[in-house]
Image: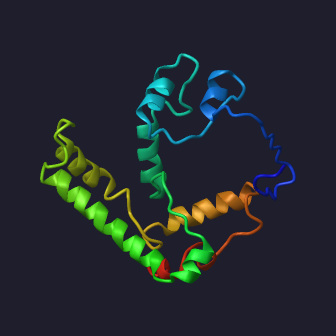
Amino acid sequence: REVFPNYDSKARIEYVEGKKTPVERLLDGEVDAIITDISDQKLFDLLENSPKVRRLFPNYVSEDEQLYRETGIYTPVHLMVMSQKLNRQFPNLARKLFNGFEQAKSLAYEEILSDRGGFSVVYLRERLKEQRERWGDPWRYGIKANKQTIDTFIQYNHEQGMIREPLPCEKVFAEGTLGS
C-alpha cells in the first residue's frame, strides 16, 4: 500500500505493519534510524539515555548554529497545515491564525524578558537575550522571512522525489498568508 507518492524511481520504501511505534522499532533493532518529534519528557529521557541510541549529530546545537550562519536557515520543527477546503470556506482564517501566532510569540517573549515566565530555568531571560544576539529571531514567521528555508525545502522535496516539480508559494500557502 502506498501512503504517499514518491516520484523517484530509484527510491525504495518499505512499509511495516503492526502497532509498534517508530521508537519501539528503533530500540528493538527493526529500523536503523528515525526522525521524530521528542516533545514528550519520557520519550526524551528514553532516547537520550538508551545505550542503543545515539544522535546522528551529537553536537546538534553547534550544527544548527553552523547551518544558520552558513545559510540563514534555522531548522524548522513545527508547521501549521490547513486543508484547501477549510481555506476556501474561511478565506481569512489563515491570516487570523498567522496573526494570532505572531501575537502569542510576542507575549511569550515579553513574559520571559519580564522574568515572569522563567522562574524554573536559571537565567532564562539572559538565555533569550543571548539567543537574540546570536540568532536574531529563529522563530520568524511568514513567507518573506522564511523564503530561503521554503525554497530549500521545496528543492529537497523535488530532488528526493516527494513532489513532481518545484511548487510556487501560491500553490503551497493559503492566499491569506501570501503577503506575510
In the image, taking residue 172 as reference, residue 161 lies left or right, namely right
Q: Is 144 rendered above or below residue 156?
A: below
Q: Position of residue 33 (x, y in %)?
A: 65, 32
Q: Residue at x 73, y 58 (%)?
A: 162
Q: Position of residue 71 (x, y in %)?
A: 48, 56
**Total of numbered circles in the picture?**
0
Pick out the residue farthest to the right: 9
In the image, taking residue 134 as reference, residue 44 lies left or right, namely right
In the image, taking residue 170 as reference, residue 29 lies left or right, namely right
- Front residue of 126 and 176: 176
Q: Is 44 rendered above or below residue 85?
A: above
Q: Is 67 rendered above or below residue 40?
A: below
Occupied quadrant, residue 54: top right
Q: Residue at x 33, y 67 (%)?
A: 102
Colour scheme in use: rainbow
- Front residue of 101 and 134: 101
Q: Residue at x 52, y 19 (%)?
A: 50
Quadrant of the frame with the C terminus: bottom left
- Front residue of 177 and 60: 177
Q: Position of residue 21 (x, y in %)?
A: 63, 34
Q: Position of residue 97 (x, y in %)?
A: 41, 71
Q: Residue at x 66, y 57 (%)?
A: 156
